[in-house]
Amino acid sequence: MNIARWLSKLWLVSLVSFPISAGEWIFKTGAFWSQTDSSVTTKSFDNQDITLDFEDSLQLEKHLLLPFFELGYKFNQRHHVYADWRRLHRSASSKTNFGFTLPNHPDSGVIAGANLNTRMDIDILSAGYGYSFYQNAKTEIGGSLGLHVMFIEMGFSGDISACVNNAGSIICDSTATNGEVVDESATAPLPDIGLWTHYQLTDDWTLNAHSQFFYLKIDQVKGYLADLNASVSYQINPNWDIEFGYNYYIVEAEWDEIQLKYNYRGPMVNLAYRF
């Protein structure tokens, strides 16, 4: 996936139609301790719901330390643009074994097993424009318009083996994938609308909150996105801040009798540099 190409497109979109004058750049880098839940639900041949839970069924990690980057530019006192990237890459190896006897043949049976390697890589890019519509000595409140893009890459590899016991005669066979089977996809840029606020507790400490939402329903396709963040930041010096926060991100979508659910949540620590 060409992340740099998409990031540059989102960044350019966020700048369109807004005059730029000398201002302040802010670069943030950090990590968050993510607790992730993801699943897909579809219909079986008998029209019953089948749900595949990626954490429980495929043993993908629920808790993982993941990186975060953001670049922002503030200009004209009330305007700013931003772009950020979050990387959620997980992998797991799982083993399954089961056995059963053949109907009407209690002395015959089948033992089968599978070794499966699973990889689920998600990159979330977002960019947008924010406007501060209320300011006083301690409080700043603003709104934002932005875009989200999710890059999803899933890889599977492994083998399945089985042995049949036919009245004492045991026959075994196995099959394996030819390398890794990879599926790549990306969402279209999804628009979102947000609200943010800063409150100056003291000269060095600031409370921050930012929320972004998106909802779409067209015929049989519907879905929504919510990105919520709350933090407190401490100004180390005029150029450096450290930020402690909590982030909650959820995406749900339904189409063609398929329902996808994905969310992560957890604490974050960021270091910000102003120049």
Image: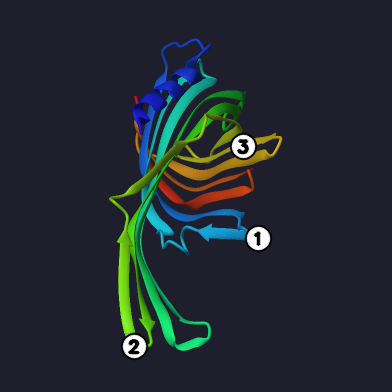
Report the amino acid beneath label 3: Phe
Q: In the image, which is nearer the foreground, mark 3 or mark 1?
A: 1
Q: Which residue is mark 2?
A: 168
Where's residue 176, x and y in %?
Answer: 31, 59
**Which of 237 and 157 lies nearest the eye of the viewer?**
157
Left or right of residue 65, residue 256 in this image: right
Mark 3 neighbour density, 10 Å: few (under 14) some (14–19) many (20 or more): some
- For the C terminus, give its image quadrant: top left
Left or right of residue 109, residue 171 in this image: left
How many numbered marks does the figure carry? Answer: 3
Q: Real-space Cα distance between discs 1 and 2?
A: 36 Å
Where's residue 261, x and y in %?
Answer: 56, 50
Q: Which residue is mark 1?
A: 46
Label 3 SS: strand
**Which of 100 and 236 lies nearest the eye of the viewer?**
100
Q: Earlier in the sequence, mark 2 or mark 3?
A: 2
